[in-house]
Image (cartoon, rainbow, N blue to C red):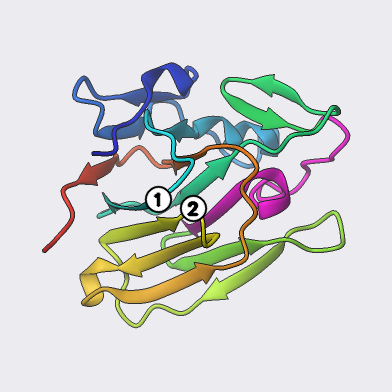
Amino acid sequence: DVMLNPNSTISNVAVSVDQRQVATVRTFTFKNSNPRDFSDFGVLGCQYFSSGKYYWEVDVSGKIAWILGVYSKISSPNKRKSSGFVFDPSVNYANVYSKYRPQYGYWVIGLQNTCEYNAFEDSSSADPKVLTLFMAVPPCRVGVFLNYEAGIVSFFNVTNHGALIYKFSGCRFSQPAYPYFNPWNCQVPMTLCQPSS
């Protein structure tokens, strides 16, 4: 059973007592904040996975922005640890999404501006490859499937009969993988749910 790790948060978010819900407690506007501030809403799951297959579901109803998926620490001597996450100080995170790509240990999808769904892939430039995802039915609940050995992270629209949203394949995990949740700049909570049958 996946639960949120309250020890992996900072002051911008709050985790519920039952460790199943995360919400932003302080929001920012793009005008007066550094884009790096938006990465400070992330929370890891308590459980980590170094083998096997796992599935969890997240209720994102009513949210106008969120990022979720899997995080796995990337080993590198140039990286420093901060709030449970690894940041590369040599990378310019001018784009808020710059850190959300596999080369930095993130296999995630997200929503911004109420209706823009994206997947974040690696690219050869400093800017991430942001893929726009089409949703026939906007998801109120997203299922995340991790197959550690096969290197697969898949996302499903539980609201639309479990339709595949996006699949990362060929993921190379050198460290344990953690569920990753980011309520982003939206105070509506993200909630872990029991998987639908």
Q: Which is more toward the observer, 159 or 64?
A: 159
Crowd around label 1: few <14 · some 14–19 · many ≥20 (10 Å): few
Q: Which mark is residue 163?
A: none
Quadrant position of the N terminus in the picture: top left
In this view, 12 is above or below 91: above
The structure residue drawn at horizontal position 24% and vertical position 67%, both measured from the top left corner, is 158
Q: Residue furthest bottom?
A: 136
Q: Which is more toward the observer, 175 or 129?
A: 175
Please tell me which of labels 2 and 1 falls first in the chain.
Answer: 1
In this view, 51 is above or below 32: below
Separation (CA) of disc 2 from disc 1: 6 Å
Crowd around label 2: few <14 · some 14–19 · many ≥20 (10 Å): some
Q: Amino acid at mark 1?
A: Gly
Percent position of residue 151, x then y? 55, 59
Q: Magenta segment: does it hold 102?
A: yes
Q: Magenta segment: does it hold 98?
A: yes
- Regarding residue 118, the answer to whether it shows in the image is yes
In this view, 87 is above or below 31: above
Label 2: which residue? Answer: 148
Label 1: which residue? Answer: 52
> Is residue 15 rendered to the left or right of residue 149?
left
The structure residue drawn at horizontal position 29% and vertical position 33%, both measured from the top left corner, is 3
Q: Quadrant of residue 125?
A: bottom right
> Which residue range is magenta in the image?
89-112
The structure residue drawn at horizontal position 43% and vertical position 34%, both measured from the top left corner, is 48
Q: Amino acid at mark 2?
A: Tyr
Q: Which is more toward the observer, 4 or 60?
A: 4
Percent position of residue 150, x then y? 52, 62
Of helix, strand and loop, which one carries label 1? Answer: loop
> Is residue 177 rendered to the left or right of residue 4?
right
The answer to whether the residue labelled 2 contacts the one labelled 1, judged by CB atoms less than 8 Å apart, is yes
In this view, 147 is above or below 159: above
